[in-house]
Structure formats: structure tokens, C-alpha cells
Amino acid sequence: MAGKRTLNARNLEALGAAALAELLMEVSSGQAVIQRRLRLALAAAEGATGAAQEVRKRLAAIDRARTFVGSARRPALLSDLEAQLRAITGPIAADDPRGACELLLRFLEISGGVLARCSDGTGAVLGVFERAAGQLGPLALAARLAPEALAEHTAELLLENDHGQFDGLVPALKEALGDAGLQQLERCCREQGARDGSRLLLQIAETRGDGEGYRGQFSAADLRRRPIAAGVAHVLLANGRAEQALEILDGATAETAGPLDGAWQDGRMAVLEALDRPAEAQEMRWQWFCSTLPVPHLREVLRRLDAFEDGEAEERALRVAEQHPNRQRGLEFLVAWGALAQATAWDGEAVALHSAAAERLSADYPLAATLLLRPMVCGALEMGRTSRYRQAAEHLGSCDLLADRLDDWQGHPDHAAFVTRLHGRFGGRWGFWRLVDP
């Protein structure tokens, strides 16, 4: 049970209103962000009108600002934006949905300027505006905003979507706009320069469930391109037109299998399943795996097999990966699948291959990357190749950095134990250890 000195709402409430007010005045002194939060809370206590005035003033100030916001100042900006959004969708929306809808539109309008003048490598600021866009539909419904008016406002936002903050706006407004509003939105966008095949018009057609409208934005030559055919087939399939989807897919020009062909492959598998042709889909799934070694596709292959068949199929898949002509891709698959024994058993001379794979895997699979780097260190020391000592020392340094991110070594020696073993076996390789401990 929490003690009386633990910082929580119950303990603070026990201090009483007067004591809390004094504390808030003290901690907010010189803190502009906290002061704005407090003024907003005071305005909200007076009712929706007061809170709306405070939000409107603050949005105008944010829009007028021209100072670049770096990473150090980004948390304050985020806090400010979140506070305004909470006020709009909270107390203001509860009392005055129409007024809140107008403020939310204003909030979205300033997004381009804010994103253009801030460092947002984490995507946090963009995320605030994406969440705000997602709340426009429910708020517009509560405000009973006319679909035609909403369509005009939406078109203006979409045509200023320089940072992708409104990529999900059209689907989010499907219910609020209705089919008539979506048609109006399409007309508005076309009047302002949108052309057939643009992402915006395609998204409107897809949201409407208009397969023919989506397909009609492409020429016959366009439809022979597999990425475009895959997109059209996806919309047709979603609207129950699997036969037409298959016709579009099969009419596309055959291309060499590769990662960029994935959408067409996945689309055709989905269509075959919808047409109750699972055996063909399964064979296609397996062939695609053999070509490009995608982990999700092998999982799907195994999931659809009987229990006594999946083990044999997995062994066959591992052999395919070990013999794959693209050695790096094969190695990456083995590590991602967890077949570390097969991965680390590969030729220790393949230094460039292992190094590249370890670098790619280090972000998401620190243990796997470590287990690829260790054999290269051992291999260089085992053979006494002084020309590779510097690279081996760099690999050991990388293992040290990766170790900081590892809590579970899954039965493998931790970094300290590995280094101790190296000293025990290769303590006499002074040229190597001078590079490790200069």
C-alpha cells in the first residue's frame, strides 16, 4: 500500500485546496507551459466559452510563431499542443460540439506551419496532428456539421498535406461525410488541381467502395504495371469482386520476382483464397518464400499445414535459406527465424556478409547480431590473421555496445564471460589486445 508521502492524486488531495494552490503558484513561477495549462484550466472552469477563447488565443500565438523548435524545446511544444487538443475534445466538445469542431479545424490548419519549423525526428509532433485528424469525424457528427461544408474544409486541409499529417483523414471522415459528402470532396479536390491517379482521389474512391471509380483512374498501360494492378485488385476484392480482381492481376506484365513485387504476390494469394482455391494460394505462397525468404509468408505456409506436416516443411524452408543464392538474405532470414545454429555455422571467412547482416540486425535483434559478430572475432584470433585484428577489435567493441541492450542472453555467455574466454584462449595475441585496450 502506498505511503502518505507517495506522490499520487489521493495524497495531494488531502493537502487541501489552499495548500495546493500555493504549491501550484510556486512551481509555475517562470514556467510558461505550466502557466498556460493553469490558465486553460481556469478558463474551462468558467464554461466552454471561456475555454474556447483561451484555446483560440493560444492557437493564434502558435501559428504566428516563427522560431525553430529543436529537440530541446520539442517537449514543451508537445505539451502545449496536447493541452489544446484535450481542451477542444474534452470540456469544449461536451458543452459546444459545433464550437469544438471549428476549433479542431483551426488546430489542424496550423499543423503545416508547426511541422515546418520544428525538429520532429521522433514523429511525436506529427502524431499529435494525426490523432487530431482522427477525432474530426466523431466531432463533426456530434456537431451535426453539414457534409458539404465538412467536405470543403477537408479539401483545403488535404491539399496542404505536405507532411503526411492528413494521410488518414479521408477514411476517418467516412461516416461524417457519407457518400454525398465524399463525392463533394472529390469535386472540390479536382477543382483545386487533383488529377486521376493521385493518392488523394484514389483514397476517396477506396473509401467510397467505388471499385470502378478507382480502376477508371488508370489507363490500360497503367494496369499492366504490377504495383498498380495490385492496388486496383485490393479495392475490387474489398468490394466482393474477386473474379475481376484476378483478371486485373493476371493482366499485369510478368516481372522478375523481387521485394517490390510483394504487393502483387500478396494480392493474388488473397484473391485465390477468396475464390476458394487455397491449394493454388499455398503453392504460390511457398514459391514466393523460396524466392525472397519473407518470414511472414513462411509462418502462413506452416499455419495452414497439418500438425504432422509443418515440422518437415520448416526443415525444408531452412535448407532453402541455407542454399539461397542471395547469401545475405539467407543469413538474415535464419537469424530472424531464430535458427542461430545454422546462421553462425556459415563460413567464418564471409566477413563482409556477416558484418553487413549484423549491422542490419543490430537495431531489432541485438543478441542475433552479437552471435554473428563473435565468430568473426574468434576466427581472426584462431588463425592469427593480424590483418584482421583491427576489424575484429571493432567487432568486439560492437558486442560491448550491444550488451548494454541485452537482459536475456538465452543461455549464451554474456559479454563479460565471452571476453574472459577470449583472454583464456588467445591471451597471447598482443597485437589484438592492444587494439582492444589501447
Image (tube, grey):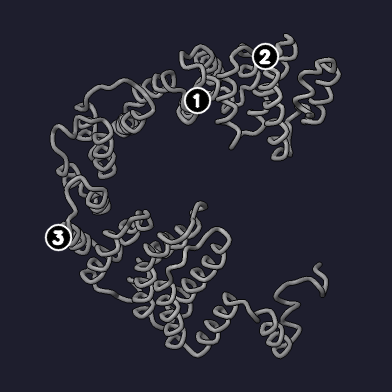
Q: Left or right of 415: which side holds 28?
A: left
Which amino acid type is shown beneath numbered disc 1?
Leu
**Helix, strand or loop at mark 3:** helix
Compare residues 178 and 120 and report the one nearer the observer.
120
Q: How far apart are marks 3 and 2 (CA)?
A: 67 Å
Q: Name the residue under label 2.
A: 387
Compare residues 24 and 169 and report the one nearer the observer.
24
Q: In which quarter of the image is residue 262?
A: top left
**Helix, strand or loop at mark 2:** helix
Q: Residue at x 42, y 75 (%)?
A: 59
In this view, 368 is above or below 308: below
Image coords of residue 68 (percent x, y) = 47, 63
Q: Quadrant location of the N terminus?
A: bottom right
Q: In which quarter of the image is residue 66?
A: bottom left
Give the label, 3 or 2, closer to the camera.
2
Q: How far apart are marks 2 and 1 (CA)?
A: 45 Å
Compare residues 426 and 302 and report the one nearer the observer.
426
Q: Left or right of 323: which side holds 111?
A: left
Q: Residue at x 79, y 29 (%)?
A: 437
Which amino acid type is shown beneath numbered disc 2?
Ser
Q: How crowded is mark 1: few (under 14 residues within 10 Å), some or many (20 or more)?
A: some
Q: Mark 1 points at which residue?
A: 302
Q: Name the residue under label 3.
A: 191
Image coords of residue 414 (percent x, y) = 78, 31
* Between discs 3 and 2, the one toward the N terminus: 3
Q: In which quarter of the image is residue 407?
A: top right
Q: Are marks 3 and 2 in contact (CB under 8 Å)?
A: no
